Amino acid sequence: MTSSRLRVGFVPEHFSTPIHFAKKHYGLDAELIPFPSGTGHMITALRAGEIDVGIGLTEGWVAGLGKAQEAGDKDGGYRLIGTYVETPLCWAISTGAERPEIRTVDSLQGGKIGVSRIGSGSYVMGYVLAEERGWLVPTAGVGSDKEQAAPYSDIVVLNTFENLRKAVNSGEADFFMWEHFTSKQYYDKGEIRKIGEIYTPWSSWKIVASTRLIQGDGNPDAAVENLLEKLDQGIKHFNENKEEAVKYISTELDYSEEDAREWLKTVRFPERTRGVDAKVVIQTVETLCTAGVLKINSSVDASSMIAKQR
């Protein structure tokens, strides 16, 4: 239980616009803490007690809990409590502007992948890409538990989007993956070059709460329920005031008006954030197992990752 204001971690990108509206127009009384380095950093902060709630990428949250379960940690630090974005995320695959040796996605096999953190969405999607491209070659064992060869020669942890962009130009990394519209302005400037894209096979954003805020009956604390109601109001305002959303995104979040309008055509937020489709979590676990992020036939339990539904 908590008696103080909730500390809410979020990624300060265009997807955060309904959160801004919830605070500006509907009295969301929470401390909003930006995590530009993404979901992996929020997992660390949740487990350290630095934030109470996180709004981040589905694959990052599920991978974090799956890894914890594999290590024998049944708590994991947080539970999935809500859905923030229903549409898939388009991950752009980027390399340096002057990397003539890198022309196609297939040329990335065996290269150096830049990620924000181990366990982050940028890390997880690297393995989803490898699985999709057939780069996960079995090396030992038999049956469904056989080990797979590493698809990349190195995983370079770079923490921030800025560092990722610098690394593919310096040669420290060969490529990285980040959300398309956040990357696009840097293509337009000629700083980095797009060589491909990949979509998540699931709804892209989930809301989690620290297990300290999950009550004995499995339901989140009343303060968390109130937060979700405020987010619902922010989403409704977003859906009904697209011009205000475009203005905010293009003036406060460093996106062009054109890109903001294009993004609006691609995204769908839920009318009600409370609740998580268990099928989505199961599918994510299965994909992460296939991609080698989680172990096949391990003790990972998708249903236990979700707080009690209403």
Image (cartoon, helix red, strand yellow):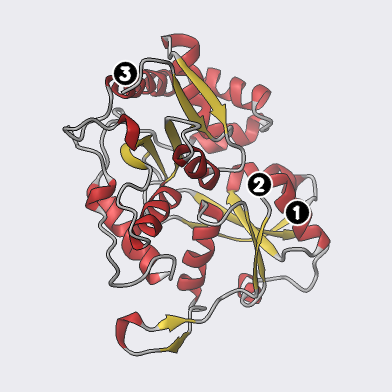
Mark 3 is on which residue type? Answer: Asn
Q: Classify mark 2: helix, strand or loop.
A: helix
Q: Quadrant of the C terminus?
A: top left
Q: Earlier in the sequence, mark 2 or mark 3?
A: 2
Q: What residue is drawn where x is 55% and y is 57%?
A: 118
Q: Does 131 sit left or right of 157 as displayed?
A: left
- Identify the residue under disc 1: 192
Q: Please report contact status of discs 2 and 3: CB closer than 8 Å, yes or no.
A: no
All told, the count of numbered labels is 3
Q: What residue is drawn where x is 32% and y is 64%?
A: 286
**Could you tell me residue 144's position as x and y percent?**
31, 81
The answer, for residue 23, to whether it is visible in the render is yes
**Could you tell me residue 159's position as x and y percent?**
65, 48
Q: What residue is drawn where x is 80% and y is 70%?
A: 100
How far is mark 1 from mark 3, CA to CA? 41 Å
Q: Please report contact status of discs 1 and 2: CB closer than 8 Å, yes or no.
A: yes
**Could you tell me residue 242's position as x and y percent?**
49, 22
Task: Using the image, tell me which numbered label, if any, was put on residue 183.
Answer: 2
Mark 1 is on which residue type? Answer: Ile
Residue 195, above or below 296: above
- Identify the residue under disc 3: 226
Mark 2 is on which residue type? Answer: Ser
Q: Dot 1, how many residues are within 10 Å of its Cα: few (below 14), some (14-19), or many (20+)?
A: many
Comparing 68 with 266, the one in front is 68
Q: What residue is drawn where x is 36% and y is 57%?
A: 66
